[in-house]
Amino acid sequence: MTIIDPTSIDPTSTATDVTAAIAFLRERIAGEVLVPGDEGYDAASSAWNLMFRHQPVVAVVAATTADVTEAVRFAHAAGLRVAVQATGHGVARAADGAVLIVTSRLTDVAIDPARRTAYVSAGCKWGAVLAPAQAHGLAPLLGSTTDVGAIGYTLGGGMGWLARRHGLASDSVRAFDLVTPEGVEVRASATEHPELFWALRGGGAGTFGVVVGMEIELHPVEMVYAGNLLYPVEMAREVLTRWRGWVADMDDKLTSAVTIMNYPPIPDVPEPLRGRSFVIVRGCWSGDLAEGQELIDEWREWRAPEFDMFGPMPFSQVDAISQDPVDPLPAMVTTEWFDMLTDRAVDVIVGATAPAGGPPLVLFSEIRHAGGAMRRNAAGAANARGRSGEFLLEMVALVMAEPMAPAVAGHLAATRAALAPYVTGAAYLNFVEGAEKQERTAEGFREDDLRRLQAVKAELDEADRFCHGLAITPVAG
């Protein structure tokens, strides 16, 4: 898979003086080239999770795909590391001392309703894809919020509310357009650089170069039966164990979850929920609406929820299921996979999220039902290990004041330790951030798949300058 053409690099860009090199870069960039002290540098370098701060040598806010290529070639010539962000979600390693390429202005989307495909540029959020796709009765495999960058989410896998029926977002990709670590533009697909294509579909963002666009399949989805049933948090164990049995042999047209939610006492939360805790049955049925209602009626007949927010919904309103925040927040997140959700595991999760006699340290713990197409499509996928369990736990804690951080980190670590006897040991890497994302990279892949990823990495980036994503070190195959 030799795809690098070193002769394409402009020899004049080999200036060793950083100041002179940045001045040269500014002449070639249509967007912005920002260094510490420049107006806009802090905004361009901000991550969505306020726990992280980037301090790059230079931030390049690309206005065109050519800007990305120029920035990568500049970094290659100067021997600098490269980090990439669009919306700033999913930080693994801060871009300190690196070139940070910001793709948030690259937002072109093209829908082809006849082929049921979309071309998505590097900086697009899912909302910019969903709206025009829905105009044709189609939908991408987005996640729990339309406010996340489509490409970074997809490179890490991407488990959304259609996952059990159609698989992960990475399964729907037909082609990636990539700028390699040496600044060469290539297309990777099943027929063009297929090994690179395999690696990019689940092998993680920011590891093999800068993906400047992707072509994805769209799926016919218009109306769904979706939403939330909110029960008192005191019923958490009862609801979790009932849900565990309810989803056994469940039709793949339903992707569901149970969430223990501690709503913070802030104005952004609706008054009836503000400062209260609930256990929530949530999900999305993408089949016949009457069948979906019958399924959810089983819960209503079992116990009437305190708040019933389940019903027919245009898929364009899918954000209403998870109701994820849009504004940046300081948070810590962790994850685990289960093949079986034992009574003891349920007790640990409930106790860690809704403790008796004290304020909770966790905002929410959500257990998603996986399987279905997620598991069927895992054969041959780069991230086969990180997608093949039955139940996926995500725990999120807000850290509203810096002194809270050690207590929150300790609580999440203690919870994972208590769950250790019951988990698979695999990790879904889109649900971890910071040091844990890099430390647990190997847990997202089978040993042979990790070696294969390392071989692709060695071919593209032997110097490991794209080291701000997953910790996939270059090792020759």
Image (tube, rainbow, N blue to C red):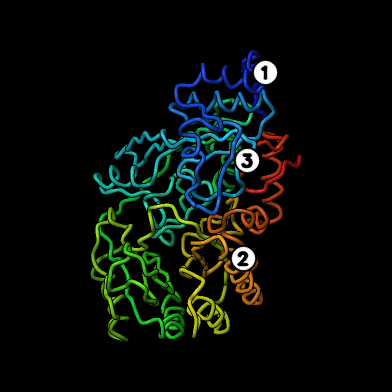
Q: Is residue 86 left or right of residue 424?
A: left
| Mark found first going from the N terminus, 3 or 1 | 1
Numbered disc in front, either 2 or 1: 2
Image position, residue 13 (x, y; %): 63, 17
Outermost residue, top direction?
A: 12
| Mark found first going from the N terminus, 2 or 1 | 1
Residue 14, numbered circle: 1
Marks 2/1: CA distance? 44 Å
299 relative to 315, above or below: below
Outermost residue, right direction?
A: 476
347 relative to 471, above or below: below
Image position, residue 383 (x, y; %): 59, 53
Label 3 close to label 2 by CB (< 8 Å): no
- Picture quadrant of residue 119: top left
Image quarter (top left, top right, bottom left or bottom right) of the C terminus: top right
Q: Residue at x 32, y 47 (%)?
A: 130
The residue tagged 3 is 96
Image position, residue 402 (x, y; %): 55, 60
Label 1 residue SS: loop
Label 2: how many residues lie within 10 Å, few (<14), some (14-19) or many (20+)? few
Residue 406, numbered circle: 2
